[in-house]
């Protein structure tokens, strides 16, 4: 990619140089903080236009709804930064919910560990196939999208059985419990995201995730454990999607079989909106969280308007994703 | 020592190359043989007719997808484009069958041009560019149709889905004609040569002065039109415009058919006959599982396994 703009003539006056660096800086800030700026603007508009938006009930609901998607998008962020993509999270999420509801009859530990074990295994297989055979990540995870959905149908007698969680089960607290007015899932998502951010930024593992996505062959030559890194990120993604499913089951009090269809697209969109590059090698967890909030604020506004039907939501999501990607592309060009 | 080493390696490479190129034909033959032996009522004209009718839409979409994959791209929006074209049919049916089909195809063309523009001129990765339309396109189709299933009663239009021409169902005929057209396009035209060259090595193509961007635009436009054709045929066969379900997961079936047919995801090669056979194979797998009363869950898991095995067999060796 040698764009002609990169051929800078060496005879540049100092003020021109300064102007250019300032422009590059601005482009960089916009690329990284664009979603945050839009989020602030959207929240301000919603707050002023719809009296219901600012109520404690609505904000609490917004935070709760965001927490499930945030957990899934956290795993997706790691996968995308490593240069891959995970299309199986929607199915794995649904499978995790069903397994949690199924396992809840044997108590809290089984309800939590069963989905984690199975979904983690699916993620592990994804990772092994991607890392060891060199197959394209989107094909591998497309196949496991089908597989997880098939497994879900097999467990639920072709979707005819919906496992319910007993109303006295202590597992319900994971989804429905509250602490200081906020739902438990909000805290869990927050803790996971902070931990993920530390893992990504402060540890050797995080650095090799960046290196794998940024320049795989260089990472290999430097002796980084590229294959192990890939296996780890897909396993994490599977674990987190399954866990989000378990939390959702606890919230809904049952393992709903039809959820999670198309959820992988939501997760990818919010990660991209948050400034993570789909080619890998760059991204932040904070950006992803902002992306999740932005998506749900927009959805909330559409609900507040009330006259728009739910199908309009996906049109807005698609258009929004597009605008963000196009802007990212232009900003990346401006920085070069 | 070294000579035998290279000898075994090259024979292994040749074997895997052979498997990649012709594995799909072998699989179709094996499945056909299995069904002839073990499936009751398989060997009947009516059954073959049904199988071909079912395979036709996937085959048409897969042809467009094969062209896109040949350029090292992918089009995830084909299912949504099918839904869009299905949603438009009943709106214009009052003005005549011809116009309504034309409008549906125009929608496919616009969608394809839109994808192509994003990929070729803005420089967005194909997965993301077409993902946006996958998310938004079906929503738009549902908004257009107000979320409803609309029954289509126009007999001329329904004939497209159910009638025969020269003893062959119309949609199968359409799929056959399009297959020949795409085959000729890839092998006999400058456009086809350029498409393959771009997929093989994009920067070399640019440096060689090929019109990379217009060709890419054209490829995505074609893929959009093909998806719209499949949407029209699916609507005619169903006898109703159903934007909620038409083309659901079609991108998955089409990509699988293309890859199983021996077209590498890394671009630079398009196997048209292999793609057609890939579509037939997926339909045969589906039919076999259904006819032996395997539940949907097992069918999906088997399909997942087939995708993985096929892509594993077809993956590019690192020799390139």
Image: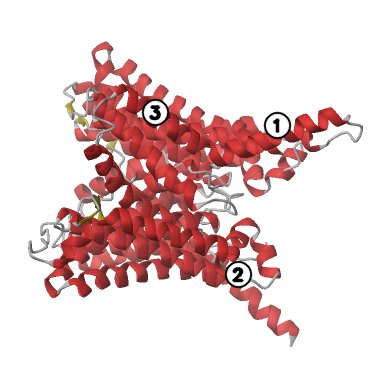
Give the position of the C terminus of chain B as an image quadrant.
Answer: bottom right
Q: Position of residue B71 (x, y in %)?
A: 58, 44
SS assignment at label 1: helix
Determine which residue is flagged by label 2: B14
Q: Are marks 1 and 2 in contact (CB under 8 Å)?
A: no
Determine which residue is flagged by label 1: A23
SS assignment at label 2: helix
SS assignment at label 3: helix
Closer to the N terminus: mark 3 or mark 1?
1
Q: For the residues carrying marks 3 and 1, which lies nearer the camera in this image? A: 3
Q: For the residues carrying marks 3 and 2, which lies nearer the camera in this image? A: 3
Vertical side of A51 occupied by B313: above or below = below
Q: Residue at x 39, y 60 (%)?
A: A192
Q: Which mark is residue A44?
A: 3
Q: Is residue B160 visible?
A: no
Vertical side of A324 occupied by A282: above or below = below
Q: Residue at x 25, y 59 (%)?
A: A247
């Amino acid at each position: 990619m040698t764009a002609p703009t990169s051929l800078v003539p060496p005879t540049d006056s100092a003020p021109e140089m300064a102007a250019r660096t300032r422009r590059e800086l601005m482009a960089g800030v916009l690329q990284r903080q664009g979603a945050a700026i839009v989020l602030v603007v959207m929240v301000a508009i919603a707050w002023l236009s719809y009296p219901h938006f600012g109520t404690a009930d609505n904000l609490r609901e917004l935070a709760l709804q965001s927490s499930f998607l945030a957990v899934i998008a956290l795993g997706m962020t790691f996968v995308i930064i490593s240069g891959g993509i995970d299309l199986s999270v929607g199915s794995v999420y649904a499978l995790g919910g069903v397994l949690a509801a199924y396992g809840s009859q044997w108590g809290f530990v089984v309800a939590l560990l069963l989905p984690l074990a199975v979904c983690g295994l699916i993620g592990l297989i994804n990772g092994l196939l991607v890392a060891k055979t060199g197959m394209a990540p989107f094909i591998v995870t497309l196949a496991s999208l089908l597989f997880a959905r098939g497994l879900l149908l097999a467990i639920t007698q072709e979707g005819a059985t919906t496992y319910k969680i007993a109303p006295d089960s202590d597992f319900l607290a994971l989804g429905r419990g509250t602490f200081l007015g906020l739902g438990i899932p909000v805290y869990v998502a927050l803790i996971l995201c902070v931990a993920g951010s530390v893992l990504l930024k402060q540890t050797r593992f995080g650095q090799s995730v960046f290196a794998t996505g940024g320049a795989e062959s260089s990472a290999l030559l430097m002796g980084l454990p590229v294959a192990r890194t890939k296996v780890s990120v897909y396993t994490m993604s599977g674990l987190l999607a399954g866990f989000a499913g378990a939390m959702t089951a606890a919230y809904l009090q049952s393992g709903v079989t039809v959820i999670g269809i198309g959820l992988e697209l939501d997760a990818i969109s919010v990660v991209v909106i948050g400034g993570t590059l789909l080619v890998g090698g760059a991204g932040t967890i904070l950006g992803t969280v902002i992306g999740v909030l932005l998506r749900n604020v927009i959805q909330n506004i559409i609900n507040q308007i009330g006259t728009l039907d739910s199908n309009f939501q996906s049109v807005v999501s698609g258009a929004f994703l597009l605008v963000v990607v196009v802007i990212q592309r232009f900003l990346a060009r401006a920085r070069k | 020592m070294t000579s035998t080493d290279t000898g075994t390696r090259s024979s292994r490479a040749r074997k895997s190359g052979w498997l990649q190129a012709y594995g799909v034909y072998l699989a179709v033959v094996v499945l056909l043989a299995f069904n002839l032996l073990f499936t009751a009522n398989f060997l009947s004209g009516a059954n073959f007719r049904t199988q071909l009718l079912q395979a036709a839409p996937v085959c048409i979409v897969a042809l467009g997808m094969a062209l896109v994959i040949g350029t090292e791209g992918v089009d995830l929006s084909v299912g949504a484009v099918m839904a869009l074209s299905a949603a438009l049919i009943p709106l214009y049916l009052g003005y005549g069958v011809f116009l309504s089909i034309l409008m549906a195809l125009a929608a496919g063309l616009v969608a394809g041009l839109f994808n192509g523009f994003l990929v070729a001129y803005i420089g967005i990765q194909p997965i993301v560019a077409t993902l946006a339309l996958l998310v938004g396109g079906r929503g738009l189709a549902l908004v257009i149709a107000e979320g409803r299933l609309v029954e289509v009663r126009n007999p001329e239009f329904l004939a497209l889905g159910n009638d025969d021409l020269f003893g062959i169902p119309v949609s199968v005929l359409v799929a056959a004609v399009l297959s020949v057209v795409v085959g000729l396009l890839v092998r006999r035209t400058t456009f086809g040569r350029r498409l393959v060259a771009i997929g093989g090595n994009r920067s070399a193509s640019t440096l060689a002065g090929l019109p990379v961007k217009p060709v890419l635009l054209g490829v995505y436009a074609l893929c959009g039109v093909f998806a719209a054709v499949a949407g029209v045929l699916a609507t005619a066969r169903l006898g109703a415009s159903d934007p909620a379900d038409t083309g659901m997961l079609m991108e998955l079936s089409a990509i699988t058919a293309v890859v199983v047919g021996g077209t590498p995801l890394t671009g630079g090669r398009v196997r048209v006959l292999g793609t057609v056979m890939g579509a037939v194979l997926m339909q045969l797998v589906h039919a076999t599982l259904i006819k032996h009363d395997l539940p949907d869950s097992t069918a999906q898991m088997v399909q997942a396994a087939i995708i993985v095995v096929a892509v594993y067999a077809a993956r590019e060796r690192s020799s390139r």
